[in-house]
Image (spheres, rainbow, N blue to C red):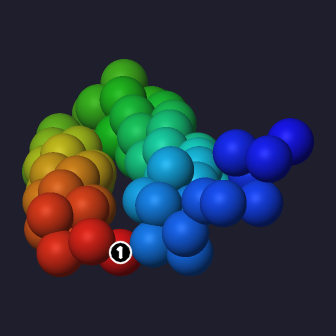
Amino acid sequence: MSAAVCESNESRLANASRPGVVALVALGFGIVFVGVVSGVSLLYLEEELLGAVILTATMAAVASLAAWSWRMSRAGY
């Protein structure tokens, strides 16, 4: 208990869990699920162009979300 009292604010912030990471992972899974289901459904219904566009947009959205998350983690947020 004395270690918790003596711990500085900086070390508490550095060791604290980040709830934003869980939200980003959930958002990424949601994007992937909706995008893949929609894209594959359109491909199955012979709407090749629209299905390919949706699948490509899904990959781009997840890649940009991952890049933004990596950039924020390097900045310390």
Q: Quadrant of residue 73?
A: bottom left
Q: Nearer the viewer, residue 8 or 18?
A: 8
- Name the image quarter holding the C terminus: bottom left
Give the residue at mark 1: 77
Residue 62 is at least partly visible in this image: yes
Identify the residue at image location x=66%, y=60%.
Answer: 6
Return the residue found at the far top.
44
Quick one: 57 or 23, which is closer to the camera?
23
Identify the residue at horizontal 55%, vertical 69% (top origin): 8
In the rendered view, tell whether residue 64 sits above or below residue 21.
below
Q: Classify residue 57 by image quadrant.
A: bottom left
Q: Position of residue 76 (x, y in %)?
A: 27, 71
Q: Quadrant of residue 42?
A: top left
Please report the residue visible at 59 percent of the width from the left and 50 percent of the height from the top: 17
Q: Position of residue 51 (x, y in %)?
A: 26, 45
Q: Amino acid at mark 1?
A: Tyr
